[in-house]
Amino acid sequence: MTETMKHTLLFVFVGVMILAEGATDFLFFSGSWNSALVILNMGLISAIMAIGVNIQWGFAGLFNVGIMGFTALGGLAVVLVSTPVIPAAWSSGGVSIVMALVMGALTVVSAVMVTKFLPAGKLRTAVLLAVLIVGFFVYRAIFDPAVGSVEAINPALQGNIGGLGLPVLLAWPAGGLLAAGAAWLIGKTALGLRSDYLAIATLGIAEIIIAVLKNEDWLSRGVKNVVGLPRPMAYEIDLQADPAFIERAAAFGLDGVEASTLYVKIIYALMFTVVLLALLWMAQMALKSPWGRMMRAIRDNETAAEAMGKDVTRRHLQIFVLGSAICGIAGAMMTTLDSQMTPGTYNPLRFTFLIWVMVIVGGSGNNFGAVLGGMLIWFFWIKVEPMGILLMELVTAGMAEGSALKAHLLESASHMRLFTMGLILLLVLRFSPRGLIPEK
């Protein structure tokens, strides 16, 4: 069997599993097209995140463990771009918040300029401390009252500055730009670190981003969440109130609720597929270009690349920004799919380490492997829990009712998800160390 045939069959296997989820009510398959489309849509988004990580790690060897933070910034972009403007918030404190943020940025820039242009010594230390202390107190004096004013406006439903009221599809590239900007700032300071220290730094910065989103209600409503975000198509309840849509659904033997749910998810699946294919094509063209060959040369031997005149730090920053931007786009797509921004749900297990499992299992350095890993691992992530319950019921079938061991095993079935992810990772590393579709 040729390598191309083998890789094609792997994608066919994933497709058959998703089709079986929709068409078959057997064992752990639900027999629900709604469930199959949910898995497909999140699998497509996960594949996009995996491409972003693969660009950073597979192309350049950058160990980024801050994926969660860039994904969250993509979600924030949906809130800032697509939600309606709140005039009362801007008139009461929105302008002051912007002024305070500008003041904070000027303080940082001034501190950098002092460090750069004044010679080392007591004078530079005194001036630097004066700039930082004065800037901090001025910033807080403007910022705190403005935030209090904004968060006091209808806190049950608003309490934030709102957005620009633009079409939600514009939030997807905006999410990429916001994540790219944050990646540039992070990369300017952290990319000089060795791979293990870079991982620690990016993980810590991602946690800082999530902490800001959870606590700054004026920006993202914090843990109160932003719900009812605009969609690129109608909500299901609006479709169910449309007589023409109900009539068309009846022609296919579907009721309004089922038809509206499937219709929305199918439209999302088509949109996500277009985005995935576009990013995959661009990643492949980049990989095959002289730029892609240069990045892999830097990955394999930085010293030799520097000897050939390549600016390694600049190229690392470049690819760090590109990969993070793709994760930001995926984060904006996911928030649009959910129609809500929930900062409390972002956690490293789901939005960082699971994406790394997808890249490693699929094949580091291979974009098609990243897509395969994203789809395959997400399917198992969702379906392992019912599989675990079924397995535990089978194992405990002969045990007496009321047995403490039986109760413990049944309660522990949900943890099969983590066990299975580790098992899959170990098996792939043992029998196919370079992934299911390895780098050529």
Image: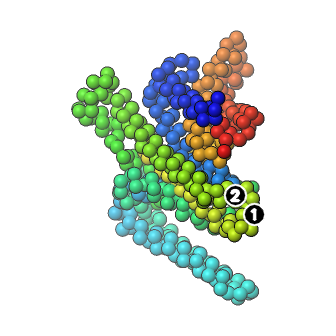
What's the residue at 66%, 45% (across, down)?
A: 440
Q: Amino acid at mark 1?
A: Ala
Give x and y (percent) for residue 132.
Answer: 62, 78
Taking depth in this image into account, of 201 and 188 the one nearest to the observer is 188
Up the image or down, 278 lies above or below 181; here it is above
Q: Secondary structure at mark 2?
A: helix
Between 148 and 56, which is closer to the camera in this rendering?
56
Q: Are marks 2 and 1 in contact (CB under 8 Å)?
A: yes
Which numbered disc flags the more N-terminal residue, 2 or 1? 2
Q: Nearer the viewer, residue 379 or 364?
A: 364
Instruction: Tell me the distance, in whole angstroms, between the alpha carbons under discs 2 and 1.
Output: 8 Å
Q: Quadrant of the N terminus?
A: top right
Seen as rendered, the residue at the extreme front is: 2
Residue denoted by label 1: 304
| x then y, percent, for residue 191 | 68, 63
Which residue is rendered at x = 53% and y = 26% of the image?
16
- Residue density around tag 2, few if under 14, some if 14–19, many if 20 or more, within 10 Å: some
Q: Which residue is mark 2?
A: 297
Q: Quarter of the image holding residue 299?
A: bottom right
Residue at position x 65%, y 62% in the image: 316
Helix, strand or loop under label 1: helix
* Residue 359 visible: yes
Task: Judge from the rendering whether residue 311 lies leftward or rightward of residue 81; answer left or right.
Answer: right
Q: Is residue 165 left or right of residue 314?
A: left
The x, y position of residue 41, in whole percent, is 48, 38
Q: Residue furthest left?
A: 243
Mark 2: which amino acid?
Ala
Q: Which mark is residue 401?
A: none
